[in-house]
Amino acid sequence: MKNPANPNLRRTLRRLALLASISLLAACGGGGVENILNSLWIYSVDAPSHANNDADVTVTARASSTGNISDDDMDWSWHQNSGKEVSNLSIEKVGNSSVLRFKAPSENTTVSFTVKVEAKGLSDSENLSITVD
């Protein structure tokens, strides 16, 4: 003889599993399964800790990702947070990297930057400082 409570129990468990899944998606920003499987992070920032006045400086940030994020999906930005304003600033995207080039100020200062990478609703950022004298 079949237990009549079994179909109701199964239905209730399915509803609870669905509700739990929806709650998890909402907790992570509602990005759906795609953003659960995707990840994006900056894994290195190659920058000198020190630069001479008026020197040409190069900083390279590299990112990695999982899921269906490609190098072409990555958008990079750089922001100078403090210090004397740098000159001849240029930014180049090369694959999964972004290269910042600039001329260090002629005055002694510490310049700080934030680099940020974004793709498919995800982002990561790193801060760096370079002492110029």
Image (cartoon, helix red, strand yellow):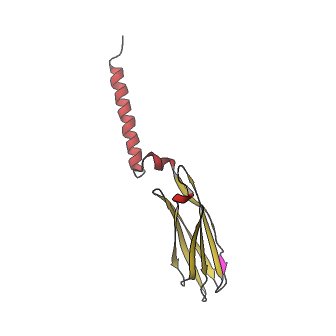
The percent position of residue 58, horizontal first and vertical second, equals: 64, 75
Specify the quadrant that holds the C terminus. Answer: bottom right
In the figure, residue 126 lies in which quadrant? Answer: bottom right
Task: Please name the residue shown 32% across and 18% down the image.
Answer: 4
Q: Is residue 106 magenta?
A: no
Residue 90, percent from left and from top: 57, 76
Q: Which residue is found at the position 59% from the left and 75% from the top? A: 129
Magenta span: 47-53
Above or below residue 32? Residue 15 is above
The residue depicted at 35 percent of the width and 28 percent of the height is: 11
Above or below, comparing residue 74 to residue 13 in the picture: below
Confirm whether the magenta stretch covers residue 48.
yes
Q: Is residue 102 left or right of residue 2?
A: right
Q: Is residue 106 left or right of residue 26?
A: right
Q: Position of residue 21 (x, y in %)?
A: 41, 41
Q: Position of residue 38 (x, y in %)?
A: 51, 50
Q: Is residue 17 left or right of residue 115?
A: left
Residue 50, picture quadrant = bottom right
Q: How many marks?
A: 0
In the picture shown, does residue 53 fall above or below 27?
A: below
